[in-house]
C-alpha cells in the first residue's frame, strides 16, 4: 500500500469576515513583547562583548609589535654596520648616528 500526501497551494488567502471586513491580526501579548526586547538586548550585549574582546586583543598585541619593530631596527643597523666594515669603508659602531 502506497500513501501519497501532497499539499496544494492555491495562492494567498485573505482573512475576511462575512460582511467583507478584513480581520485584524491579534495584538501582541506582553510575553511576546518581553521576548522581542530580551532578544534585542541579548544580541546587543553579545556584540558589545565581542567588540570588547577584539579591542583587548588589539591592545595586547601593541607591545609585541613594538618589540618586533625594535628587533628589526637593531638587525637593520647591525647589517649596515657589517656591510660598511666588510666593504672597505670606515667601521662605525652599529647604533651610532
Image (cartoon, grey):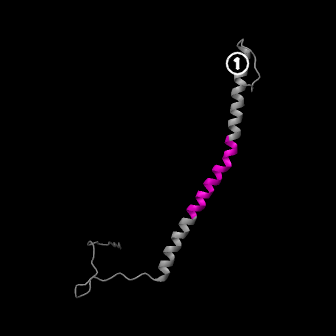
Q: Residue at x 51, y 78 (%)?
A: 34
Camera-side residue of 82 and 3:
82
- State whether residue 28 is above or below residue 69: below
Relative side of 31 to 92, left or right:
left
- State whether residue 97 is above or below residue 43: above
Q: Residue at x 69, y 43 (%)?
A: 64
Quarter that holds the N terminus:
bottom left
Count of marks placed on residues: 1
Q: Does the magenta run of residues contain 52?
A: yes
Q: Residue at x 66, y 50 (%)?
A: 59
Furthest-right residue in this view: 93
In the rendered image, which residue does mark 1 sit on?
83
Camera-side residue of 18 and 52:
52
Residue 26 pos. (x, y %):
38, 83
Relative side of 10 to 56, left or right:
left
- State whether residue 74 is above or below residue 5: above
Magenta region, residue range = 46-65
Relative side of 29 to 92, left or right:
left
Q: Residue at x 53, y 66 (%)?
A: 43
Q: Does the magenta run of residues contain 19?
A: no
Residue 10 pos. (x, y %):
26, 72
Image-quadrant location for residue 22: bottom left
Residue 12 pos. (x, y %):
27, 73
- SS under mark 1: helix
Furthest-bottom residue in this view: 19
Furthest-top residue in this view: 88
Furthest-front residue in this view: 97
Mainly helix, strand or loop, the magenta region? helix
Amino acid at each position: 500500500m502506497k500513501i501519497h500526501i501532497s499539499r496544494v497551494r492555491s495562492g494567498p488567502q485573505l482573512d475576511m469576515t462575512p460582511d467583507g471586513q478584513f480581520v485584524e491580526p491579534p495584538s501582541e501579548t506582553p510575553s511576546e513583547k518581553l521576548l522581542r526586547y530580551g532578544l534585542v538586548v541579548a544580541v546587543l550585549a553579545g556584540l558589545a562583548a565581542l567588540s570588547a574582546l577584539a579591542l583587548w586583543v588589539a591592545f595586547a598585541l601593541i607591545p609585541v609589535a613594538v618589540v618586533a619593530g625594535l628587533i628589526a631596527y637593531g638587525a637593520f643597523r647591525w647589517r649596515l654596520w657589517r656591510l660598511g666594515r666588510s666593504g672597505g669603508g670606515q667601521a662605525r659602531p652599529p647604533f651610532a648616528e
